[in-house]
Every structure is written in structure tokens, then in C-alpha cells.
Amino acid sequence: MTAQLKSSSEGATMVLRISNPEQRNALGPEIYAAGVETLNRASASAEVRSVVLAGEGRWFCAGGSLQRLQANRAREPEFQAESIEGLHNWIEAMRAFPKPIVAAVEGAAAGAGFSLALACDFIVAARDAVFAASYSNIALSPDGGMTWQLARSLPRQIVSEWVMLGERIAADRLHALGVVNHLSDSGHALSDALAIAARLNERAPNALASAKELLSEGSHATLSEHLNAERDHFVRNLHHPNAGVGIAAFLAKEKPQYR
């Protein structure tokens, strides 16, 4: 079966499912391209307020296909470089996407699957789910922005342990460290992720887009630069129609209806 990225809708939430169940939802170039294309369409759609990323069946994503990687060793290095660029284009599209993305992790998120989960704004994981930066187990190094994400979230020694030893990391440990937002009972990660997405869908899209952009830019801006950015976003959002709706609803103790 060809690996694919399936898309469906749950109200204002787009659900993307990595579908390659015979290989535990292993990734490939066709999924990377579909991910970028789908997010580009969703970005321009007022009907989509959020995205949930999940895996088909019992697994989130096992990362890259080892059979494909072994075959690529017989090809020119540029071929594999182009494939990784496809993955990185998808990661960058996720970070630039102006709407929240929630990962729903069941089973395992390994290798680039772990990287994909880290690129999301929220991670919901089943209590028995595991994560693994398993590259060193097969003499490889991380891709998909994994080390960039983890190095900005956790002490170097913890990240070194995970990346260099390649051991499985339990979802509850990631939750305790603040990497996973919510632990779910087994089989309920998707429904819990959709519940979080539904709460996000009730908020002003322009305000969420500003929050996401500020969080992404905050790690490399100086304090002065970031204060200026916060000022500009605040002023722009204050003069957006949704601020009028939100302030009026709060004062009237009513539920706002944002557009």
C-alpha cells in the first residue's frame, strides 16, 4: 500500500492522518509533499480553524522507511538530501501555518515521527505511547528539526541522553517535562486532541495566529525586538473586528462569536 496523507473534517478542525499502516505509518516523499500542499490550502480557508495530526490505526508514525533508506544508499547523496528537504519543507510549513496544530499520538512517535509531533503546537499522547529519537540505533543523526526543538525546550543533558542513546521515552516523562500537553487513556488521543482543537476553534483566529508567530520568533529575537513585535501584534489585533466582539461579549458576560 502506498503511503498517503488522508484528510477529513471534524467541524472547523481538519484531521490529517498519516496512513501507511503496514509499515507503522512510516513516512515518504509523497507524504511530505501532501503535507505542504494540504497546509497551504487550509491556511487560505476560513472554514479551517485548526488541524489535528494523527496516525492511521494504532501508531502515530515510525519515522522514515528503513527499506527506502537502505535503497537510497545505492543512489547519489543528493537523492537523499532532496528527500530530507521535502520533510523539512513540511516542518517549516507547520511552523509557519497561522492556525494551531495538535498532535494526537498513539503507539509510538519515532525518528521523524517524533520530529513531526514536536513541530505541532500541542501534543496529546496516550499514556502508553512512547517517543524515540532512535537515529543513533542505526548509525544516523536526527532530522526534521528534532534537535532544534528539543534544545530550546530542555536541558542539554536530557536531550543528549535521548538523541545519543536512542532509548524509548515514555509519554508520562515527556508530560512531566512539559513537552506533552495532555495524557489520554489508550485509544483516546484523537478524541482528546479534537476536544482541545474545538476549544481553540472558539477563539479569535487572528489572535491565535499572532500568538503562534510570537512564540516562534521569540527564541531568536532580542528583548527589544520582541517587545516591538508584541506591540505591533497587539495594536493590529485591537483594531481587528474580533477585538470589538470579544471585549463587548466579556463586558456583557456573553459568549463571543469570532470570525
Image (cartoon, rainbow, N blue to C red):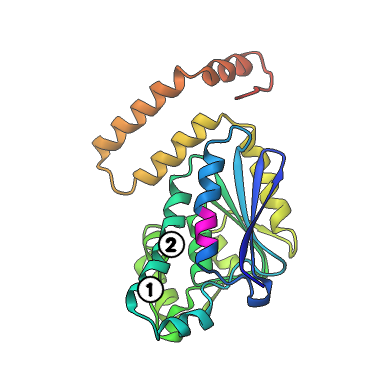
**Which residue is identified by label 1?**
79
Residue located at (53% from left, 72% from top): 63
Q: Is residue 194 left or right of residue 73?
A: right
Vertical side of 239 occupied by 114: above or below: below
**Residue 23, x across and y down, in percent:** 63, 76
Task: Give the mark nearer the N terminus: 1 vs 2.
Answer: 1
Helix, strand or loop at disc 1?
A: helix
Q: In which quarter of the image is the N terminus?
A: bottom right
**Residue 19, x across and y down, in percent:** 65, 65
Q: How much space separates mark 1 and mark 2, taking CA atoms?
A: 11 Å
* Disc 1 and disc 2 in contact, CB within 8 angstroms: no
**Residue 157, x across and y down, in percent:** 37, 72
Residue located at (45% from left, 62% from top): 87
Vertical side of 248 occupied by 8: above or below: below
Pair 1/2: label in front? 1
Residue 116 counted in the magenta span? no
User: Residue 222 sits in which quadrant?
Assistant: top left
Residue 212 or residue 54, whichever sits in front: 54
Residue located at (24% from left, 35% from top): 224
**Which residue is identified by label 2?**
86
Residue 205 visible within the image: yes
Vertical side of 248 occupied by 126: above or below: below
Bounds of the magenta span?
31-35
Residue 33 counted in the magenta span? yes
Task: Specify the amino acid type for callout 1.
Answer: Phe
User: Residue 159 sits in which quadrant?
Assistant: bottom left
Residue 177 visible within the image: no
Magenta-colored segment: predominant secondary structure? helix
Task: Specify the amino acid type for callout 2.
Answer: Gly
Q: Is residue 88 left or right of residue 243?
A: left
Residue 194 or residue 252, whichever sits in front: 194
Vertical side of 227 occupied by 220: above or below: below
